[in-house]
Amino acid sequence: MTSTAGPTRWALIAGSSSGFGEAVARELAKEGLNIFGVHFDRRSAMDRVNEVIAALKATGRDVVFFNINAADSAKRAEALDQMQAHWKELGGEHYIKVFLHSVAFGSLKPYVSDTPEDEITQAQMEMTVDVMGCNLVYWIQELMRRKMLGKGSRIYAMTSAGGHSVIPSYGAVSAAKAVLESNIRQLAYELMPHGITANAIQAGITLTAALAKIPGSDKLADFASARNPGGRLTTPQDIAEAIAALMSDKTHWMTGNTIRVDGGEDIVT
Ligand SMILES: NC(=O)c1ccc[n+]([C@@H]2O[C@H](COP(=O)([O-])OP(=O)(O)OC[C@H]3O[C@@H](n4cnc5c(N)ncnc54)[C@H](O)[C@@H]3O)[C@@H](O)[C@H]2O)c1
């Protein structure tokens, strides 16, 4: 599929190698968007990441992945320089139609424990809130300065029910999600005059690498699938399809929301 008239559309996905980010990259490539992916993977995971890149390229889209820590400001600037250089090489006009922040990088330690060494530290708390809650803002600031976002761009960030409720061992990530949702509202407010919308996507419990790291995730998943009115857990594809639908020009007035995409899981108490 070739893009419609106007600048060439790209998706920039932070967390593109797995879970929701991967599924969104695959779906948006099918929808005709080229893909810039940012991920943070060890060498041992690169065979699988290269398979994802190959599958994306097989759709005929242009695909460039950056294996960097999204929270490292120098690496972020370097990656953005390379993206702009790539656009220059291609010629013509380009913009980021969809920016998705789907990074899972946090501490899952309890706040209080009989063994103090097990308790979360200040450094772990700050790192979690920074990478999962605030990092999105720094990407958007750079993208705006570089004029890589424009009228019609859509910003999404992945949140969870943890943003407003307690999940065991998830305290720091819960705090990060609450911060993320607040940052999305602020971005929505400041970017609406530019014709850019920002929304948080609240996914239901989904079997991904990040979920598997949460202590007791099996129980969480069993509980969620038993109470979900849809009778199953959420899948990355559920989120990918929702974002593909939400990026429509017809949603230009929807901004600052936390949108549940969970089959009704969170409305069931
Ligand atoms: N799985 C769930 O049940 C669930 C539910 C709601 C929200 N979420 C949120 O969705 C987001 C994505 O989680 P997932 O479940 O798809 O996880 P995942 O582990 O499958 O994917 C995480 C992605 O983030 C990348 N990443 C991790 N640290 C990074 C860093 N510092 N810099 C750049 N990239 C980095 C990884 O390389 C990977 O591509 C997270 O914010 C998570 O909290 C997950």
Image (spheres, rainbow, N blue to C red):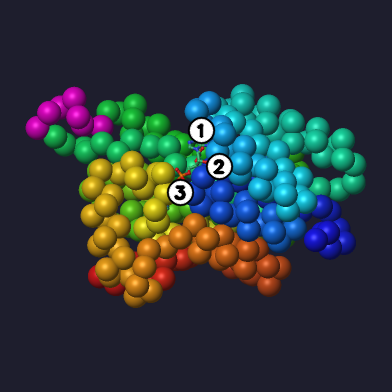
Instruction: Indicate if the residue with disc 1 has its beta carbon within 8 Å of ligand 1.
Output: yes
The answer to whether residue 74 is visible is yes
Instruction: Please indicate whether residue 29 sits to the left or right of residue 206 in the image.
Output: right
Q: Which residues are magenta?
A: 114-120
Tags 1 and 2 in contact by the CB under 8 Å rule? yes
Q: Which residue is mark 1?
A: 45
Q: Which mark sits nearer the N-terminus, 1 or 2?
A: 2
Q: Amino acid at mark 3?
A: Leu
Q: Residue at x 49, y 57 (%)?
A: 236
- On-image quarter of the N terminus: bottom right
- The numbered dot on residue 180 is 3
- The numbered dot on residue 6 is none
**Does 132 appear in magenta?**
no
Q: Residue at x 72, y 46 (%)?
A: 57
Secondary structure at numbered mark 3? helix
Q: Amino acid at mark 2?
A: Ser
Instruction: Indicate if the residue with disc 3 has its beta carbon within 8 Å of ligand 1.
Output: yes
Task: State whether residue 148 is above or below residue 162.
Answer: above
Q: Residue at x 71, y 61 (%)?
A: 31
- Of the pair 219 and 116, the residue shown nearer to us: 219
Q: Which mark sits nearer the N-terminus, 2 or 3?
A: 2
**Structural distance between the alpha carbons of marks 2 and 3:** 21 Å
Residue 67 lies in what quarter of the image? top right
Instruction: Indicate if the residue with disc 2 has its beta carbon within 8 Å of ligand 1.
Output: yes
- On-image quarter of the C terminus: bottom left
Q: Amino acid at mark 1?
A: Ala
Task: Return the x and y of residue 62 as percentages of the image width and height.
Answer: 76, 45
Within 10 Å of disc 1 (Cα), the crowding (few <14, some 14-19, many 20+) is few
Q: Which residue is mark 2?
A: 17
